[in-house]
Image (cartoon, rainbow, N blue to C red):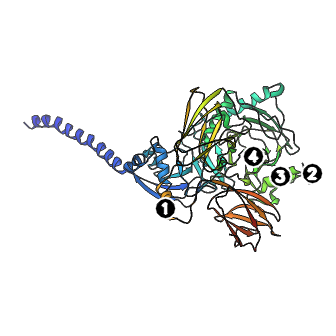
Amino acid sequence: NQSRFTMTMRPLLSLLVTVVLLFQPVASLQTVSANSNSATFTLYDNGSSQNGVEMEISFDQFHSYVASSNVDDITPSEAFAIEMSSHIEVSKYMAPKPVIATRAYREDGELITDFDQLLPNDSTSQNRRVYLVAEGLEFVWPFVEYGYNQTVSDKVVPPTPGTGRVFLESLSETPRVFRVYNMATEEEANAIIETALSKTGDGALKRSTVGSAKGTDGGIDAKEDRGRTSENSWDSDSPAAKKMITRSFQLTNIEEDDGKRDGLQVVRYIPGQGYNIHPDYFTTQDDSDFDFHPYSGGSNRFATVFMYLNEPEEGGNTVFPHTSDIGSLDDVPQHALDMFSPSSWERSITEDCYTKLGVPPKLGTAALFYSITPDGQIDASSHHAACPLIKGTKWGANIWIWNKQRYGDLRTGEPRTIQMKNQCDEDVYISWERKDNGVIKPGGVLQMNSYEHHRFKASFGSHKGEKIAEFTVQSEPVEGQDWIIKPPRQHGLHASTSSTNDNNDVTNSGVEVEVLNYEEHEVCISWEWNEIIILASKEESVIEAFEGDVFAASFLSCENEPFMEYTVSASKTQIWEVFEDNDEL
């Protein structure tokens, strides 16, 4: 009987154990699901490493932002960014405050489009960091601290076969410089070199030039210069070059577009050759009719990705002379100095190469640096140089990524017609390449004949005002492309600020202030304690501003106490005469 009882109960006991084991994973999954109903993360301004705000939101809150918006076509990503803008100060140079963000990125470069992206990192269990990017600007990788390593999401830059995941090493906050690992395989690097060596005729390696690049692969205004002694060619078509171009766009989080890049430049240096200090960005000195300021809707070289295709024996760093000293002149090898005359730029740069921040040339790595700050200004500290090569041969390939359609590539395609509809409560001014193209009254429609690829800007106040929307003419449809111009995005903070500050009726209308320094000393002009420009005695300049902005003038440095203030009026053009006994405020 005992034997029969045991035989009878065994199947029942096995079934009971199986049921218990089956239910245990379910209970575990339920616990994880309950914990994932809310996400805790730190919120930062674009590219910032300081002043983060701890946030916690629920799954339901994330999805409620779309429902609570009064915009019909808003995405969860944009709704989230706009809502987060009310919790932290978002930066955009010269923009009326508060600034609205329309995109939010994770610390690994992913654009936030779903609640699950806010949950802790699976591998480290660390809370996420989220960075807000103002409308019209681009994501800039945060510095965090010197030597910090950030792995790039596989969804942003897929791992390079045979090398591993791409990651960045932080080297400098100002200028913003990173060393990028696993950007290219040895096979890809060799293929680019072989393509350059195989070219003949006009496409062959030849003495490098400087100047404004206006063609697809080089520049019609380019000329040889004593400060650049390398050789170069251009490659945008070989399979390896296409991979490097795509990977560079992915790394900078800018949608790949041939109109947003110069050609992939391949350079070769032999001993003694280098490139003197220079910027990659353009200014109004290059073309006074082109808007090179991203903060005002303009276009410029946003970031440079310089890939190292081999490892020379000595020299060849990419150096940033405007950084702090990290070494002394005692560190400079005498045999390197002896290669150049004492008064030459090569000798001066060689000294910088051992005393200033630099990125060494190592096969498969790259230098990533930005010519534009996270708030949309041109970064004068981004000047750099190619250290003269001491031994061996150096091969590199670089690409300049633009925030918008690049200067010198104003493409014109087939004729197209556009209908522009103004859904704002005030007049909208339309411009193309800073040229006046008409005004649309509230609720009005403007039909215009144009061409493929042309980019239009909509502004309040004047056609030179702050951009509120833009439109690029597409290939399809041929007839009747619609551009609906909607009011700028706003969050609750903006509304409350406008309603409670009766004495500060700040609008989006851009104005120009001509500043004249009549003092005998150098004067620093600042806005909210941020340096705008330094004017020498009797020097003048024009500042783009907005009604209600308050500027201050200080002697020698903006850190000194201001001796004068100026409040911008509604007048489209105005003059501010700076001298100490001027009490006209």
Ranked by sequence position, the earlier of labels 1 and 4 is 4
How many neighbours does mark 3 have within 10 angstroms: few (below 14), some (14-19), or many (20 or more)?
many
For label 4, the residue is 282
Ranked by sequence position, the earlier of labels 3 and 4 is 4
Counting from the top left corner in percent of width and height, residue 322 is at 75, 56
* Identity, as a three-letter code, of the amino acid under mark 4: Phe
Q: Could you tell whether 276 is left or right of 33 in the image?
A: right
Counting from the top left corner in percent of width and height, residue 92 is at 61, 54
Q: What is the number of the mark on residue 499?
A: 1
How many neighbours does mark 2 have within 10 angstroms: few (below 14), some (14-19), or many (20 or more)?
few
- Residue mark closest to the camera, 1 vs 3: 1
Ranked by sequence position, the earlier of labels 2 and 3 is 2
Ranked by sequence position, the earlier of labels 1 and 2 is 2
For label 3, the residue is 349
Quadrant containing the N terminus is: top left
Is residue 472 positioned above or below 277 on the image? above
CA separation in Å, label 1 and label 4: 40 Å
For label 2, the residue is 341
* Identity, as a three-letter code, of the amino acid under mark 3: Ile
* Identity, as a three-letter code, of the amino acid under mark 1: Ser
Label 2: state its secondary structure. loop
- Residue mark closest to the camera, 1 vs 4: 1
- Name the residue nearer the viewer: 71 or 573: 573
